[in-house]
Amino acid sequence: MTSTVNKDDVRRYWESKPLGSLDLTDVGSREYFDGHDALYEHEIPFAMHMFEFDRHKGERVLDVGCGPGWLVRNFARGGARIVGVDLTDKAVRLTGESLRIYGLRAELGVADAEKLPFRDESFDFATSNGVLHHTPDTRRGFAEILRVLKPGGRAMISVYYRHILLRKAFFPLTLLALRVLSLRAAGRSKLTTARSVEEFVNAYDGDNNPLGRIYDFKEFRELCEGFEIERMEVHFFPRRFFPFGDRIPRWMHRLLNRHLGTLIYAQLRKPA
């Protein structure tokens, strides 16, 4: 499915609002990168195994939509020959600065997920974490990752998940519940005023985010055409947005993560 949203609008938004900038200050500082790492550790502790940071030493790994470089840094620490690309200059500069701060190395570049500047069968492993739902032709983004993987190569891709509370029949109740719970999400006021599920999903990444799509399992499988699906899991319940979210016990966080997680994570394989 393609979109009428102009890709330049997507680029301009993320240039002005790099990932993490709604929640963190001093963008580009060590404190910002440390804070960004802490957000992931806080919000997706049950999804870390999906990334396989320690399993690709010496392999050529691609991260599509590197943002401020969380994945790039972790693969670099694991010994991968990591390449990070992003649609925006800002993200590439931030990732480069983080590598300098932490004494890590990677290859970086500006690139469109729908037209990756790499030859066929160039990579052993690829990731794209919460990115391809922001590009106008999401299916093309999946196909490009498939193209640049070697036969037998693998990928980990995540996109927004349409869980039960984000289906049209339940959505009004979802908004009411969020208002009653006094949801607090900086720069995301539309999460409690959205007129549609689509507007709500866009607001995940900020009130002015021009494009964010959401998928159920059937729609996600269609995006994975050409891949073999090894594993699919739901993760990422943003507890920091809720009053007393830090007090949610681990067992309850695990339960919320599993049933009301906002992302589908999938490990995929290109047929040999």
Image: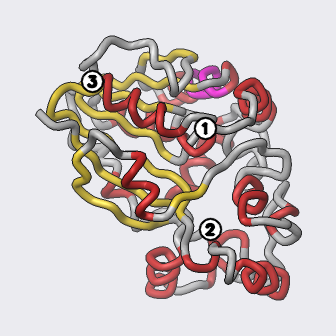
Q: Amino acid at mark 3?
A: Phe
Residue 212 placement, left or right of 188: left
Element type at marker 1?
Answer: loop
Q: Position of residue 94 (x, y in %)?
A: 63, 27
Q: Is residue 14 left or right of residue 119?
A: right
Residue 2 appears in view: yes
Distance from the alpha carbon under mark 1 to that under mark 2? 28 Å
> Which numbered circle lies on residue 238?
2
Question: Visible in this render: residue 42?
Answer: no
Seen in the picture, residue 96 relative to 171 is either above or below; the reply is above
Q: Earlier in the sequence, mark 1 or mark 2?
A: 1
Locate residue 66, reporting x and y percent.
53, 33
Q: Which residue is mark 1?
A: 2
- Seen in the image, is 179 located left or right of residue 39? right
Q: Residues within 10 Å of mark 2 (few under 14, many from 20)?
A: many
Measuring from the top left, give residue 266's x and y in whole percent. Answer: 35, 54
Q: Is 92 contained in the magenta span?
A: yes
Image colouring: secondary structure
Magenta-highlighted residues: 91-96
Labels 3, 1: front one: 1
